[in-house]
Amino acid sequence: MKTQKPLLLTVSAILAVLGAYYYIAAERQTDTTTGNPLANVVVPELDGAAREGEALFNASCASCHGANAAGKEGAAPPLVHKIYEPNHHGDMAFYRAVENGVRQHHWPFGNMSPVLNVSRDDVTTIIAYVRTLQRANGIE
């Protein structure tokens, strides 16, 4: 009987932690269909990989990161921002973000979940689009 009490307390504690986690996660969910852009983005004429990348970005990333990677208030940061310049966040950061997600560190939007159903080749093409936008906006 005495061994059941610690087990019951442990199970109760785990359930309380899980309940708190799900409650907090539900509170932090954001309606990503709205939200003002966080950056003014000049969009150059796109060709080749950048044009393909735009279509893939719109299908897989824009719901959070906004049209033209300008970010979305209350949802996700702009990728056309000095923080994401190649010398600070190289291309590997994009591959890792899609594959593994990202812990919140520069912005107050919470963690980014992995992006499902986006291949490594898709990410390469999306990077071409984002880097084209960045260069057109003075981010080298």
Image (spheres, rainbow, N blue to C red):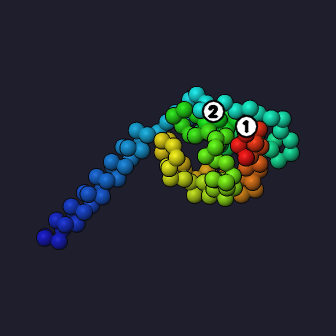
Numbered disc 1: secondary structure: loop
Q: Where in the figure is residue 43, as x and y percent of width and height? A: 76, 33
Residue 15 vertical position relative to residue 31 in the rendered view, above or below: below
Q: Is residue 26 visible?
A: yes
The total number of labels drawn is: 2
Given residues 134 and 64, the one toward you in this image is 134
Badge 2 amino acid: Ala
Q: Disc 1 to disc 2, how far (Cα)?
A: 10 Å
- Determine whether label 1 and label 2 are within 8 Å by CB: yes
Q: Residue furthest right?
A: 48
The residue at which mark 2 appears reads as 39
Residue 54 position by quadrant: top right
Q: Residue at x 70, y 36 (%)?
A: 68
Q: Residues within 10 Å of mark 2 (few under 14, many from 20)?
A: some
Residue 46 position by quadrant: top right
Residue 140 vertical position relative to residue 71 in the rendered view, above or below: below
Q: Residue at x 33, y 49 (%)?
A: 19
Badge 1 amino acid: Asn
Given residues 64 and 22, the one toward you in this image is 64
Q: Residue at x 43, y 40 (%)?
A: 28
Numbered disc 2: secondary structure: loop
Mark 1 and mark 2 lie on one chain; the one further toward the N terminus is 2
The residue at which mark 1 appears reads as 137
Residue 130 vertical position relative to residue 101 in the rendered view, above or below: above
